[in-house]
Amino acid sequence: MKTTRYLKRIDSAELDRERRSPVPSEILEAAAPIVERVRIEGEAALREFAERFDGLATDDPVRIERPELEAAFDALP
């Protein structure tokens, strides 16, 4: 049986490195209507925003591969 682990032990030095500053309020305000539309309209709204902001082609699947996702996470301030 395969065991999936969701938690890991970290030491205090790693904890300090993992801390991130909060998202600025103007960014949250700008994102709120997008999040709300996706919450209400689901994949149709998600696809619209992905086409508009990320250049997703109309017939492309809405999916981000793990290496691309990890690179985006690592690039966060």
Image: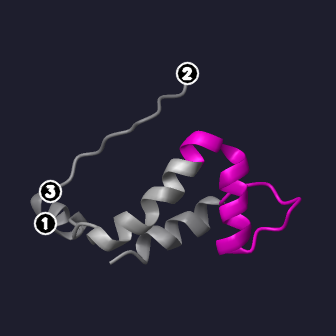
Q: Is residue 22 left or right of residue 38?
A: left
Q: Are marks 1 and 3 in contact (CB under 8 Å)?
A: yes
Residue 73 in the image, given as x and y percentages of width and height? 44, 68
Q: Marks 1/3: CA distance?
A: 6 Å
Label 2: how many Cα within 10 Å (few below 14, some 14–19, many 20+): few
Q: Are marks 2 and 1 in contact (CB under 8 Å)?
A: no
Res 16 → quadrant: bottom left
Q: Earlier in the sequence, mark 3 or mark 2?
A: 2
Q: Residue at x 23, y 66 (%)?
A: 22
Q: Which image quadrant: the C terminus?
A: bottom left
Q: Is residue 43 left or right of residue 35?
A: right
Residue 56 in the image, given as x and y percentages of width and height? 76, 68
Q: Are marks 3 and 2 in contact (CB under 8 Å)?
A: no
Identify the residue position indicated by label 1 in the image: 13
Q: Which image quadrant: the N terminus?
A: top right
Say above or below: 36 vs 29.
above
Residue 1, labelled with which disc?
2
Q: Is residue 69 left or right of residue 65?
A: left
- In reply to whether residue 47 is colored magenta, the answer given is yes
Going by the numbered disc 1, the residue's amino acid type is Ala
Which residue is more in the foreground, 73 or 7? 73
**Region in magenta:** 38-64
Label 2 residue SS:
loop
Going by the numbered disc 2, the residue's amino acid type is Met
Identify the residue position indicated by label 3 in the image: 11
Residue 48 in the image, given as x and y percentages of width and height? 72, 60
Disc 3 versus disc 2: nearer the observer: 3
Residue 50 in the image, given as x and y percentages of width and height? 68, 64
Q: Marks 2/1: CA distance?
A: 34 Å
Label 3 residue SS:
loop
Label 1 residue SS:
helix
